[in-house]
């Protein structure tokens, strides 16, 4: 007697795996340790590395992947999105929290929070751009990632809804790429002296 399995009866593995939270926790412990230690080199290293990852991913997604995805047919876009979104759900918020937080403490160590005006505008600009990047990331991109992942797990995803969400998502990613260039210019000013 042959046993047949109805493919619609088998549950698809979840796209968002909570097992990824272990490395998120490790990243936050390292960042907290760098802040608590007061070690300038370690704090600078954590800030620069997370900033490089955050900036690099934003620039790649905004200026390379976004335009490519817009031109792909729906099935190819879906295949890429199914593999990309679950990773960005964990990576991007982690980087978006650790980078400006360590940057704030680093700015305090280096005296950038007590600069006289008009030099203080560089610190205000860095804080402003970081705040917008963080709010967009946590307020727009993260919820969109989660909603897209949940929609793609359905047996019959609503592709019209997905397209609307992804269109907004790709525009926000592009704006994040542009703001990352601005923050690089600001950081270059800090490094070379204000």
Image: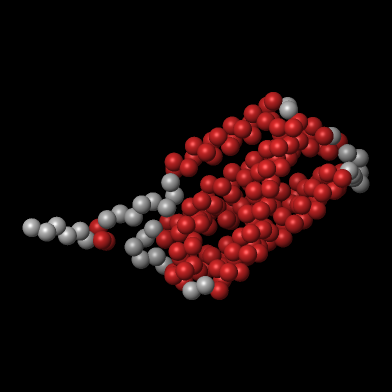
Where is residue 193 shown, x and y percent of the image? Answer: 89, 43
Image quadrant where residue 113 sits = top right
Where is residue 69 shown, x and y percent of the image? Answer: 55, 68
Direction from residue 114 to residue 12 in the image, left or right: left
Where is residue 106 shown, x and y percent of the image? Answer: 76, 36
Q: Which residue shows up at 48% across the image and 42% down it? A: 20
In the displayed structure, 80 sits above or below 116; it is: below
Residue 173 seen in the figure:
no
Q: How many marks?
A: 0
Residue 194 seen in the figure:
yes
Q: Quadrant of the N terminus?
A: bottom left
Residue farthest to the left, as pictured: 1
In the displayed structure, 54 sits above or below 31; it is: below
Q: Which residue shows up at 68% across the image and 27% down it? A: 36
* Nearer to me, 7 or 138: 7
In the displayed structure, 101 sits above or below 35; it is: below
Residue farthest to the top, as pictured: 37
Direction from residue 33 to residue 159 in the image, left or right: left
Q: Quadrant of the C terminus?
A: top right
Q: Which residue shows up at 67% across the image and 30% down it? A: 34
Where is residue 12 shown, x and y percent of the image? Answer: 34, 55
Q: How is the image coloured?
A: secondary structure
């Amino acid at each position: 007697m042959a046993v047949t399995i109805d493919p619609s009866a088998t549950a698809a593995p979840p796209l968002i795996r909570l097992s990824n939270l272990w490395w998120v926790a490790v990243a936050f412990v390292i960042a907290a340790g760098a802040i608590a230690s007061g070690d300038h080199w370690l704090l600078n290293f954590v800030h620069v590395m997370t900033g490089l990852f955050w900036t690099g991913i934003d620039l790649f997604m905004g200026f390379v992947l976004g335009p490519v995805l817009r031109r792909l047919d729906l099935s190819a876009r879906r295949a890429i999105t199914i593999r990309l979104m679950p990773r960005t759900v964990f990576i991007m918020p982690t980087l978006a929290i650790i980078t400006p937080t360590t940057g704030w403490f680093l700015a305090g160590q280096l005296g950038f929070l007590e600069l006289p005006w008009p030099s203080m505008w560089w610190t205000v600009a860095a804080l402003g751009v970081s705040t917008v990047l963080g709010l967009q990331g946590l307020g727009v991109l993260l919820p969109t990632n989660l909603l897209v992942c949940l929609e793609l797990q359905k047996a019959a995803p609503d592709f019209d809804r997905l397209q609307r969400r992804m269109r907004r998502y790709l525009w926000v990613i592009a704006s994040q790429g542009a703001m990352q260039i601005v923050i690089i210019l600001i950081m270059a000013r800090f490094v070379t002296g204000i």
